[in-house]
Image (spheres, rainbow, N blue to C red):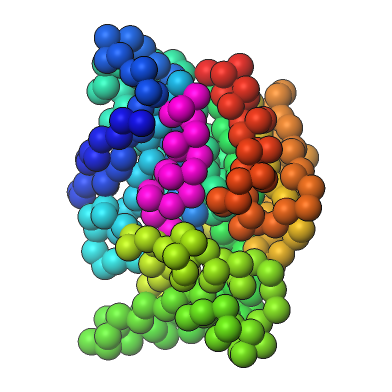
């Protein structure tokens, strides 16, 4: 498969991306394009690029997998900001870039996101009408996840701690960057963690299974307030009208993709919407395990072909 490393302009910095092309790519032709958004704490080289992006390019689409601002190889300082408002705005600039490519059919742009990227993809489609179809792979509503305790406490406890940390940093304290996962599966179990999603995330991100230099799983703590007050599905009953395909596994874990999948399909205003449940598999199985990924792609590829 042909690939090309690129950059595109954002508000005041550049984002790094990879274009993936069909094997018979001809730059004189026009192709439907798909943006592939990586999970929270991930990067373009992981599941969004090397699994779903690769498969979609092999199916005949031009795919853009890119690193979120402040993450991976993209610019922006400080590093490791996970801000849903910035993450979704990244997509607008990615589409601006796609519109400059003569071989992209700009009336046929879709988006796919994995985990937090799935929630972001559904959210940005509400107001970015250049997106014509949306796929969420085990998508998670990041704001709901934070409010449910992933940030380390109740919402008001976390917001109080974030406020104190931000004030301390303004006064000269060192920037606090937290790692969202334990150092290893063993360390997680030793600490009493039993949740399947956290343990499998650690297995994916911190072993040779999925580890990549840009997938740091870090976050700047003093910037977490924006995420705490954000809701991926806000106004979906009114604004989310594009065709959507939501894929989840039936082994639920603490990140909540199972419940979020049911919720967004129920709430979306889309006339065409489908929830696909891959039986016997978990959130992280859908990142890279051949059987559940293949089952997902058997729905995803025809969906994009039909709606782009």
Please state the horizontal and vertical placement of residue 145, each as a whole percent of the image. Answer: 62, 64
Q: Nearer the viewer, residue 7 or 208?
A: 208
Q: Is residue 48 magenta?
A: yes
Task: Give the residue displayed 23% in from the left and 38% down from the top.
Answer: 6
What kind of secondary structure does the magenta stretch mostly adopt? helix
Lateral position of residue 78 relative to residue 286, left or right? left
Q: Number of callouts in the render? A: 0
Q: Is residue 208 among the parts visible in the rendering? A: yes
Lateral position of residue 172 relative to residue 34, left or right? left
Q: Nearer the viewer, residue 46 or 245?
A: 46
In the rendered image, the residue lying farthest to the top is: 28
Q: Quadrant of residue 91?
A: top left
Q: Is residue 165 above or below residue 251?
A: below
Q: Is residue 192 above or below residue 197?
A: below
Task: Give the residue displayed 34% in from the left and 60% down from the top.
Answer: 214
Please state the horizontal and vertical placement of residue 308, each as a whole percent of the image. Answer: 53, 18
Q: Nearer the viewer, residue 110 or 81?
A: 110
Q: Is residue 226 among the parts visible in the rendering? A: no
Q: Is the N terminus in the top left, top right, bottom left or bottom right quadrant?
A: top left
Please state the horizontal and vertical placement of residue 252, each as a whole percent of the image. Answer: 75, 60
Please state the horizontal and vertical placement of residue 265, each as a whole percent of the image. Answer: 73, 39
Task: Give the residue displayed 55% in from the left and 86% down from the top.
Answer: 187
Q: Is residue 10 magenta?
A: no
Task: Give the residue displayed 29% in from the left and 66% down from the top.
Answer: 79
Q: Is residue 243 above or below residue 5?
A: above
Give the extent of the magenta segment. Answer: 42-59
């Amino acid at each position: 498969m042909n690939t090309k490393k690129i950059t595109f302009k954002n508000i005041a910095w550049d984002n790094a991306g990879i274009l993936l092309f069909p094997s018979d790519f001809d730059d004189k032709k026009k192709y439907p394009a798909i943006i592939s958004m990586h999970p929270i704490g991930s990067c373009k080289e992981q599941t969004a690029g090397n699994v779903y992006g690769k498969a979609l390019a092999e199916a005949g689409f031009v795919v853009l997998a890119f690193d979120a601002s402040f993450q991976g190889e993209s610019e922006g300082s400080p590093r490791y900001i996970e801000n849903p408002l910035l993450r979704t705005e990244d997509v607008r600039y990615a589409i601006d870039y796609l519109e400059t490519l003569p071989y992209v059919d700009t009336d046929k742009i879709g988006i796919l996101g994995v985990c937090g990227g799935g929630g972001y993809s559904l959210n940005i489609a509400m107001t970015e009408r250049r997106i014509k179809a949306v796929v969420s792979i085990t998508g998670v509503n990041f704001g709901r996840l934070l409010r449910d305790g992933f940030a380390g406490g109740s919402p008001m406890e976390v917001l109080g701690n974030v406020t104190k940390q931000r004030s301390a940093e303004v006064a000269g304290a060192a920037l606090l960057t937290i790692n969202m996962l334990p150092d290893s599966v063993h360390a997680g179990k030793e600490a009493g963690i039993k949740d399947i999603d956290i343990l499998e995330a650690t297995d994916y991100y911190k072993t040779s299974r999925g580890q990549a230099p840009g997938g740091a799983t870090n976050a700047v703590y003093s910037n977490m307030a924006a995420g705490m007050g954000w809701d991926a599905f806000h106004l979906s009953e009114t604004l989310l009208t594009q065709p959507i395909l939501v894929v989840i596994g039936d082994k639920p874990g603490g990140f909540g993709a199972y419940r979020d999948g049911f919720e967004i399909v129920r709430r979306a205003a889309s006339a065409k919407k489908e929830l696909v449940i891959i039986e016997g598999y978990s959130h992280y199985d859908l990142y890279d395990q051949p059987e559940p990924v293949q089952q997902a792609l058997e729905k995803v590829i025809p969906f994009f072909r039909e709606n782009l």
